[in-house]
Image (tube, grey):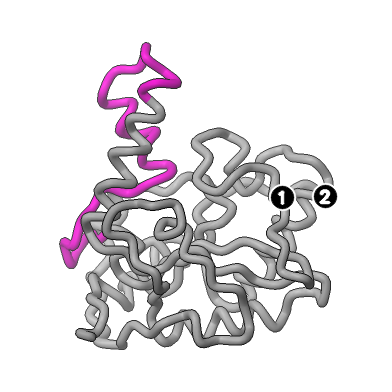
């Protein structure tokens, strides 16, 4: 059975959800033997991107649960977690420019809406923070048992309909998406429907998809080193 599509994120929904206030710290993802850590934006040369991936403690624990539930032929790959505001702004503006080149006929307001399907505006507003700025959003993928990254039916951060989790893709790619989705959902995450790789726990996006009145996490900062 094909994956069932979910509703696109309603970005105005943050106004109806109480802000997260948890002081739970961010922790580094790389020490874990349960997954491959590959900080994608650092490796891609994005300015101010970090060589370490940081997530909230409870997100770390849930990633372990997800990784352990995968079939033995797969390994979890953690690509991104918490982001500095400067990186988030760069990603949104870069996505908007990419879409403007693909669709020069679109007015600015529609370009903004399309860009929001794949990148949030940078915000550390406690009531409406960008998901990754909370430390409660993670980008993940799958590798094989030898650590080779697997084709998931679209490239990471691809601004196309193929990136939607439930998009029609080749059968093998769909099976991998389903496996990743099932593992992450069972671990307590929610999925952003326009990005097969993006999952949330504890932030306002997670609260909206779980029909919760309050988020757990607001904006976060990495510990001083």
Q: Secondary structure at mark 1?
A: loop
Q: Which residue is mark 2?
A: 172
Left or right relative to 175: residue 158: left
Left or right relative to 92: residue 155: right
The residue lying at 30 percent from left, 75 percent from top is 217
- Chain-order first, disc 1 or disc 2: 1
Q: Position of residue 86 (x, y in %)?
A: 22, 55
User: How many C-alpha atoms fall within 10 Å of the one at disc 2: few (<14), some, or many (≥20)?
Assistant: few
Q: Residue furthest top?
A: 105
Camera sees residue 15: yes
Image vertical order of residue 46 relative to residue 93, above or below: below
In space, the residues marked 1 and 2 are separated at their CA atoms by 9 Å
Q: Which mark is residue 151?
A: 1
Q: What are the residue bounds of the magenta stretch?
A: 100-129
Along the line of sight, which residue is nearer the eye, 54 or 7?
A: 54
Image vertical order of residue 137 relative to residue 13, above or below: below
Left or right relative to 159: residue 70: right
> Is mark 1 in CB contact (under 8 Å) with mark 2?
yes
* Chief SS of the magenta region: loop
Magenta stretch: includes residue 121: yes
Q: Secondary structure at mark 2?
A: helix
């Amino acid at each position: 059975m094909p994956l069932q599509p979910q509703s696109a994120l309603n970005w105005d929904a943050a106004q109806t959800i109480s802000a997260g206030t948890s002081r739970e710290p961010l922790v580094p993802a790389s020490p874990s033997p349960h997954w491959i850590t590959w900080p994608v934006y650092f490796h891609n040369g994005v300015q101010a991107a970090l060589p370490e991936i940081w997530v909230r403690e409870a997100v770390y624990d849930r990633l372990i649960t997800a990784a352990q539930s995968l079939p033995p032929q797969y390994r979890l790959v953690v690509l991104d977690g918490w982001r500095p505001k400067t990186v988030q702004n760069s990603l949104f503006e870069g996505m908007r420019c990419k879409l403007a080149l693909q669709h020069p006929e679109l007015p600015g307001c529609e370009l903004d809406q399309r860009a929001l399907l794949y990148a949030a505006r940078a915000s550390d507003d406690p009531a409406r923070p960008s998901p990754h700025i909370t430390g409660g959003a993670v980008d993940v993928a799958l590798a094989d048992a030898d650590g080779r990254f697997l084709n998931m039916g679209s490239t990471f951060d691809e601004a196309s309909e193929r990136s939607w989790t439930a998009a029609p893709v080749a059968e093998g790619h769909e099976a991998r998406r389903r496996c990743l989705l099932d593992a992450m959902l069972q671990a307590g995450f929610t999925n952003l429907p326009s990005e097969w790789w993006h999952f949330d726990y504890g932030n306002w996006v997670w609260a909206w998809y779980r029909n919760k009145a309050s988020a757990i996490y607001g904006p976060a900062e990495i510990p001083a080193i």
